[in-house]
Amino acid sequence: MITATIYSILACLFWGFIFVAPLYLAQFDCIDIVLGRFLAFGIGSLVSLSYSLFRQRDWQLLRYWKEASLCGIVMNLCYFTALTAGMRLSNPSLITLIVGLAPILIIALTCGTKKGDMPYSTLLGPGLCIFLGIALLNIETLQANWQAYSGWQYIEGILCGLFALGAWSWYVIYNTKLLQKNPTIQPTGWTSLIGVVTLIFTIIAALFRWKTIDPIYAQLFSFEQQGILFLTSSLVLGLLCSLFAFSLWNIASAKLPSALSGQLAILETVFGLVLINLFEHHIPSPIEMTGILCILGGVWRGLYRYTQRNSKFGNLAKSAPKISIRPKADTRGAPYL
């Protein structure tokens, strides 16, 4: 479990760099940054999947192309589209709060649903602590001018945030259950298969984007300083922050429960905030530091309760008396002595 937890934390660290990308690529639109990232992710996944198919002969992985398509559409298309639209239509801090409900929603959907599952009390407290930390991180920007948004536009933004919340929660639960029920699926191969499916949709979106792009703006993509920076950033975001990070996440998801994975995923927000502050040479305010400590405390408490519960049941299993039942001897036909 320790290794899986470390993998999850490393994945969140790499995902945190995604928050910094729009800062040093300010001359490029967000949609172009996303397309560049997923193009690099898809091409890298295609190379990795080809190696798995032709060198390792792992052809059974293709049986799950429908599931990979579903995960690619929901996570890479629906989630990021809804999240971006919600932040533009409504208050970004409010959308962050809505998506921050994911650990609590995942706990409600997974804990205590079957006999032997973790009870709600095990992770609900840490989940509420994490949500409190997210609220503290955004409390200053939540006090911004609410009159800047129209009524219907604001409602649309909230609906997009709720859709992003549902998409992310569904992905964590579905991805974890799929990997745990099918141990023959290699997490790295599964990541590559999702990336190849994402590549197909990304190419279609990129072609449409290229036809509608402004010719003057398109000059930024030439092989000069800005174009080389965009290409390098796309490779880092696609290969390191997507292919490698999702591989680490899937390795961990095969060993950790969905409720715990949902709590660990919130560390992406913490790493993103820390990296943004480092990039801008800004020291977090006391309220932001308190929010970060609440999130870290909630994650630590969730891990502690989960390990305590597992060790408790493990000790009970070891201390249980072993009962051996010997088969009764068959005396039919035996001579009378």
Image (cartoon, grey):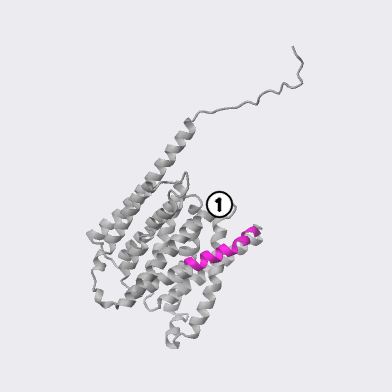
Q: Is residue 66 magenta?
A: yes
Q: Residue furthest top?
A: 337
Q: Is residue 218 above or below residue 314?
A: below
State the image quarter where residue 152 is shown.
bottom left
Q: Quadrant of the C terminus?
A: top right
Q: Residue furthest bottom?
A: 215
The region drawn magenta spans 58-75
176 or 193, which is in the foreground? 176
User: Tag 1: residue type?
Assistant: Lys
- How many numbered circles does the render carry? 1
Q: Decide whether the magenta segment is chiefly helix, strand or loop.
A: helix
**Residue 77 visible to an observer of this rendering:** yes
Give x and y (percent) for residue 312.
42, 37
Q: Going 53% across and 28% down the picture, which residue do you hit? A: 322
Q: Going 41% across and 67% down the picture, which residue do you hit? A: 164
State the image quarter where residue 217 is shown.
bottom left
Q: Is residue 212 above or below residue 129?
A: below
Give x and y (percent) for residue 160.
39, 71
189 to the left or right of 139: right
Q: Going 53% across and 65% down the picture, which residue do you hit? A: 70
**Residue 23 visible to an observer of this rendering:** no
317 or 36, which is in the foreground? 317
**Tag 1, which secondary structure?**
helix
Read off the residue under disc 1.
181
Give x and y (percent) for residue 223.
47, 80
79 to the left or right of 301: right
Q: Is residue 297 magenta?
A: no
Q: Is residue 72 above or below residue 7?
A: below
Give x and y (percent) for residue 112.
43, 48
158 to the left or right of 320: left
Q: Residues within 10 Å of mark 1 (few under 14, many from 20)?
A: few
